[in-house]
Image (tube, rainbow, N blue to C red):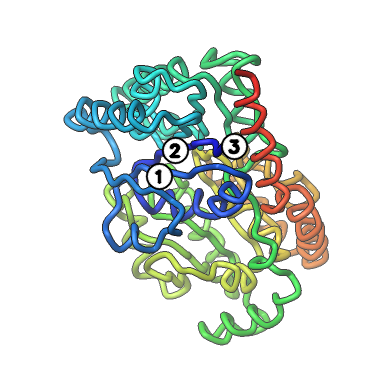
């Protein structure tokens, strides 16, 4: 008899990036897989035949108008399909699904917690999203953050207790694809991208992967780079990402980003981040909040030393003073100081890079992670 699991996220991009990798293994393990999210016909057609797709209009951000309608639709689906597990992630989808699944009396209501969005906000918006986080946790039977840092933080904050919460293996939503992020291909990838952008051998390439937004530490990254350019004439920034939230960042810094000849932007997301990471000498990640921050372990896997915010998630994907450095969030000066240190010490860069290339696959291999996840889902069901 198959075990019925339904995944719920707000938009198809989240499903594509963080869920699809597990569908086939879950199916082979005897799970009947369903997916609810805001998706178009093209995305539905791209899903494996064994995945039951339920398109549902959902908006990101504050969406009070969609709350009642989405909960009602989900409850109807949940009651009809009688899922054994409903697993949800991303803020709006998690709020709706946790309430609907509780109303439909789904036995396992699993909040797969990919960070807490309220930590990136201030004022009223912070209070709203903190409240919705508490409601989601209260309606869930089980909660699994994707990092130990967030697990400890939420327990300390009283969002949930030890009995209700745990991480699977070493955390991470979807692990590291070791075939894609293959250190043996680094020389080939590095030459390709550095030739593409005319980086010579003496150029120190700093890198970032992620969207332009205040909570990704964009302002701090730009302030840091401005200072670096005053000190070094061989430094460039390779920015891989898209301009999702331009209104949240300092507009003067955004103008600098757009006009500086030493900042190379892909102007959007790319499907082969491993190639761009291989071209980098130092990876910078000054984010304010993360669930885990997969880009950190991906950079490490490609032998790149990392400098990350000392926050739950990124701090759990690296080893301070071994694969890189942790720095305080929301402050460009420590980021600048540690970057200078690595720019000037090639031996340390190489040592950190080698250590990261060993650490990341050993602790976050997606093939091992999916085995642990299936074991956990079976255990959740076995409790009755």
Q: Residues within 10 Å of mark 1 (few under 14, many from 20)?
A: many
Q: Indicate the position of residue 326 as horizontal and vertical percent values.
A: 67, 43
Give the labeled residue for mark 1: 35
Q: Nearer the viewer, mark 2 or mark 3?
A: 2
Q: Earlier in the sequence, mark 2 or mark 1?
A: 2
Q: Quadrant of residue 177?
A: bottom right
**Picture quarter with the C terminus:** top right
Q: Residues within 10 Å of mark 3 (few under 14, many from 20)?
A: many
**Helix, strand, or loop for circle 3?**
loop
| Res 108 seen here | yes
The Cα atoms of the two marked residues, 2 and 1, are separated by 6 Å
Q: Indicate the position of residue 40 as horizontal and vertical percent values.
A: 27, 56
The Cα atoms of the two marked residues, 2 and 3, are separated by 19 Å
Q: Is residue 205 left or right of residue 56?
A: right
Contact between labelled residues 1 and 2, with CB atoms less than 8 Å apart: yes
Give the residue displayed 78% in from the left and 67% down from the top: 346
Q: Indicate the position of residue 179 as horizontal and vertical percent values.
A: 68, 67
Q: Earlier in the sequence, mark 2 or mark 3?
A: 2
Q: Indicate the position of residue 276 as horizontal and vertical percent values.
A: 56, 71
Q: Is residue 249 left or right of residue 227?
A: left
**Helix, strand, or loop for circle 2?**
strand
Does residue 247 lie above or below 283 as drawn? above
**Helix, strand, or loop for circle 1?**
strand
Give the labeled residue for mark 3: 146
Give the labeled residue for mark 2: 6
| Res 311 seen here | no
Give the residue displayed 44% in from the left and 38% down from the top: 6
Residue nearest the viewer, comparing 19 with 306: 19
- For residue 178, the mark is none
């Amino acid at each position: 008899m198959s075990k019925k699991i339904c995944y719920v996220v707000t938009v198809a991009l989240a499903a594509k990036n963080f869920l699809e990798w597990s569908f086939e293994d879950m199916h082979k393990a005897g799970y009947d897989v369903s997916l609810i999210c805001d998706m178009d016909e093209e995305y539905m057609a791209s899903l494996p035949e064994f995945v039951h797709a339920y398109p549902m209009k959902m908006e990101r951000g504050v969406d009070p108008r969609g709350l009642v309608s989405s909960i009602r639709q989900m409850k109807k689906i949940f009651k009809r399909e009688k899922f054994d597990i409903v697993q949800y992630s991303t803020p709006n989808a998690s709020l709706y699904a946790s309430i609907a699944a509780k109303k439909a009396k789904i036995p396992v209501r699993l909040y797969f917690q990919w960070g807490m969005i309220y930590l990136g906000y201030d004022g009223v918006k912070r209070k709203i999203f903190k409240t919705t986080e508490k409601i989601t946790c209260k309606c869930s039977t089980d909660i699994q953050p994707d990092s130990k840092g967030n697990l400890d933080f939420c327990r300390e904050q009283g969002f949930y207790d030890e009995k209700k919460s745990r991480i699977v293996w070493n955390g991470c939503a979807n692990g590291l694809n070791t075939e894609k992020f293959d250190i043996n291909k680094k020389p080939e990838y590095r030459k390709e991208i550095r030739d593409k952008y005319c980086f010579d051998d003496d150029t120190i390439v700093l890198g970032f992967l992620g969207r332009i937004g205040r909570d990704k530490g964009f302002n701090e990254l730009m302030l840091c780079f401005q200072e670096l350019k005053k000190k070094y004439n061989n430094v460039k920034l390779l920015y891989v990402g898209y301009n999702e939230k331009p209104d949240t960042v300092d507009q003067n810094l955004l103008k600098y980003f757009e006009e500086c000849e030493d900042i190379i932007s892909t102007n959007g997301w790319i499907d082969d981040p491993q190639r761009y990471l291989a071209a980098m000498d130092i990876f910078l990640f000054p984010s304010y909040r993360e669930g885990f921050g997969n880009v950190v372990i991906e950079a490490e896997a490609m032998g790149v030393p990392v400098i990350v915010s000392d926050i739950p998630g990124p701090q759990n994907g690296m080893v301070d003073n071994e694969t890189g450095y942790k720095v305080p969030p929301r402050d460009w000066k420590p980021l600048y100081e540690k970057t200078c240190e690595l720019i000037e010490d090639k031996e340390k860069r190489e040592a950190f890079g080698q250590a990261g290339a060993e650490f990341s696959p050993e602790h976050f291999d997606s093939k091992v992670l999916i085995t642990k996840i299936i074991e956990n889902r079976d255990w959740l069901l076995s409790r009755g």
